Amino acid sequence: MAATDASETIERPLVTTGLLERRSYQTTLADRAAEEHSLVCLPTGLGKTAVSLLVTADRLANVGGKSLLLAPTKPLVSQHAEFYREGLEVPDDEIVVFTGDVRPDDRAELWEDARVVIATPQVVENDLVGNRISLAAVTHCTFDECHRATGEYAYNYIAERYHEDAENPLVTAMSASPGDDEEAILEICSNLGVYNVEVMTEADADVSEYTHETTVNWERLELPQEITEIRDLVQEVIRDRLVELKDLGVTGKTAPDVSEREIQKIQGRLQQLMDSDDSAGYEGMSYLAEVRKLRTAMTYIETQSVESFRRYMDRQKEAARSSGASKADQRMVSDPNIQMAIRKSEGYDDLHPKFRRARMLIAETLGINDGERVIVFTESRDTAEALTEFLDEHFTAERFVGQSDTDGSDGMTQTEQQETLDRFRAGEFEVLVSTSVAEEGLDVPEVDLVLFYEPVPTAIRAIQRKGRTGRQTEGAVTVLLAEDTRDEAYFWKARQDQKQMKEELRALKSAVGEIESALGQQVGLDEIEVEESETEGSGPDEDEIAAESEPAAGTDGETEGSAGGSKPAGDGQTGLHSFAEGGSDESADDGDDGTEAVEGRDEGIVAEAAGDDEAVEIVADQRELDSTIARDLSTRDGIETRLETLAVGDYVLSDRVVVERKTVEDFLDTLTGGDRSMFEQVGDAARNYGRPVVVIEGGDLYGERNVHPKAIHGALASLTVDFGASVMQTADEEETADLLEVIASREQEQEDRSVSVHGEKQSKTLAEQQEYVVASIAEVGPVTARALLEAFGSVEAVMTADEDDLLEVEGVGPVTAERMREVISTGYTPEH
């Protein structure tokens, strides 16, 4: 907020003169946060970003280096960049934005000269895993909306790397609502390496003068009979499926309003049956999948609109018609009650009562009360689309949704989002209908009414949304609630969670010392650094310290091994790392298999040796970032990861070893879904590398699905015999990372081989192309394709052979022969 009186503005080095209004609570929080790693809790709309900017200015002026600010969405990143360029006396070209819209190579170049980087966490995570940037010179790292720092979210990995790599780190974590309870807040602090907590609420004298009362009104609405009839039909099907699950012995409940907690319990019991190779587990999972989708459908009917229900069911019918559709999808859309519900919805041309009530409330705000702006929040993009269209008939209304496209709905680009907000601020339209994208920290203008189309089931999201009003003047929040529906449950949960969070924040504020003491008792990230430096050469290694101090995600506090993945000694089994120093039965000079790098290719590059001559380098494909393997490897001592868009393979470990990674599910899909891409991928790997490796990762290969063992044996034999690939199986992503590390270490350290990305998908020979054409027919694999071509002499002869002739070929049975003739001779009918 700009001010003209210099005595009322903040005057500090690198802070733009006369820009920031002097607010004592902001300067107090900034001064404390400049001293140690801190969590700053401040109500929405009271300037958390100004606090971060003040800390950044202090660090750049007094310590030097560069600053990194992380925010979860692209619009929020853009907003922060605009504020920092205005608020800091730093050249604009030294304040850079990193999002997925900026090319990786450009980011690496921009990083070198930047003083302030404002980025989405996923981009920074990718650049760290890919070894494109270093956090060594970052002297201040801000984690905005830090309540996201749970589970596998990128914030946790970045924080770990920051504390390890930075020469002079300082963390500022910010949120208006860090968690629903003390345990959640402590988890966030632990994940980000924070041990100082600063909390200010509306009750603080310094803050209260900048806040205004926000009233919350709950509007209860009764559903018309036509809608309840549609709902009842869906409920009846849910009840039927729960009866089936009860008969399987996995639940005692059959009421259609079954809770999500009970759903989770049912899933756990079914998983146990599946682990025991009990077919009832697979049957039950199918019923449970149907229950989940029907619960979603019921939510649309009750709390959103009949139109939203129709759109959702249209998508389900389309999925049921697609190839590879699940039994659950097919059973659901063919159920007589569901078909009746769809027919009733198609014959219902009235509106959900929430639509009319929303129109009346907006009319009162903008007309009778002379308001200027209103925000309507909804959970569903379908509802946002329908509501925007409806409200625009009476007011000027526009939607505000995320960037991803969904069925029947286009997302908004970052530019479109920014332009929409700018026009809303300028008063060019009156009503903004938004999904959750506008909840977190985005500088949505001050509004006269925030209208919740449905209750928000978590305290965090409710507080974020209420923060859109009551900043400068008294505001109002209204929540629409459909009686006797899930809205009621969400209503009570939201109220309970908000009350609990307020109590926790008050308790946190009054007992900050105790909380910080609890944090201090945990071995924090900074303490790990101290222990490492003090015990170098004499104590446990870094991996052991990390394992003792920070549980791996998903282990509930128990770690099975070090951060490097090796298993603890004394378990009676030889770990992978035991073989890392062992000798090889083959000499290094046997590795020259004649494979040459392809010159002049457009995609993929030769991976140059890293700066550290002793580091083992592993090149990972960009698409492998969906797993945690590359991220895990990047945190291990002596391992340097690099990201490329690989044309061949998922991981390159040397100039002769490439790895194709398949989960058990992916592998079995190739046997049951007619997808032969795995064999093509391994064929490409074999043509480019001397030692292709296929890693099959996951559970029981023979028990995961009802696939005949001979089919699995045949696929494994083909990979080994036909393509010359080594096939290895691992239990999970951690074990895969262990395996990759061991192979790469042996290749590069013991065999003294370099890392080189040869691959492009080389042109197949004529014979290979002929085999590929025949093998692409469902039920035909590469081995059978060769047998057919050898028997008939050409692709044309195979395609014109009748069933009797096909049956004469070894490996072709009646099912395969019949399927081949069906595919070859049936007229083409495109699917729409």
Image (cartoon, helix red, strand yellow):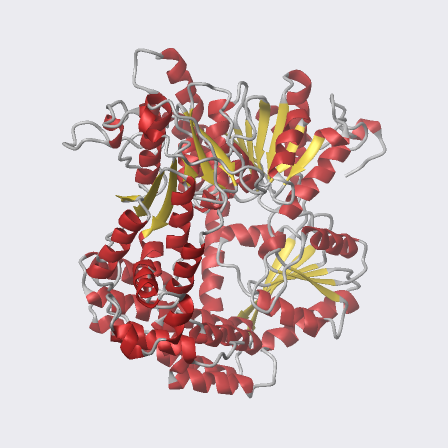
Residue 701 image position (x, y, % from top left): 25, 54
Image quarter where the N terminus lies is top right
The answer to whether residue 239 shows anywhere in this view is: yes
Image quarter where the C terminus lies is bottom right
Residue 277 image position (x, y, % from top left): 18, 60
Residue in front for this viewpoint, 807 or 578: 807
At x 69%, y 19%, the residue is: 61
Tell how many labels: 0
Residue in front for this viewpoint, 694 or 438: 694
Residue in front for this viewpoint, 247 or 506: 247
- 144 over 28 or under it: above or below: below
The answer to whether residue 193 shows anywhere in this view is: no
Q: Quadrant of residue 648?
A: top left
Left or right for 107, reference 727: right
Residue in front for this viewpoint, 770 or 583: 770
Residue 766 image position (x, y, % from top left): 45, 56
At x 32%, y 22%, the residue is: 750
Q: Quadrant of residue 92?
A: top right
Left or right for 703, reference 11: left
**Residue pushed farthest front?**
793
Left or right for 45, reference 625: right
**Residue pushed farthest right?**
4
At x 65%, y 30%, the residue is: 109
Residue 720 image position (x, y, % from top left): 28, 47
Q: Quadrant of residue 546?
A: top left
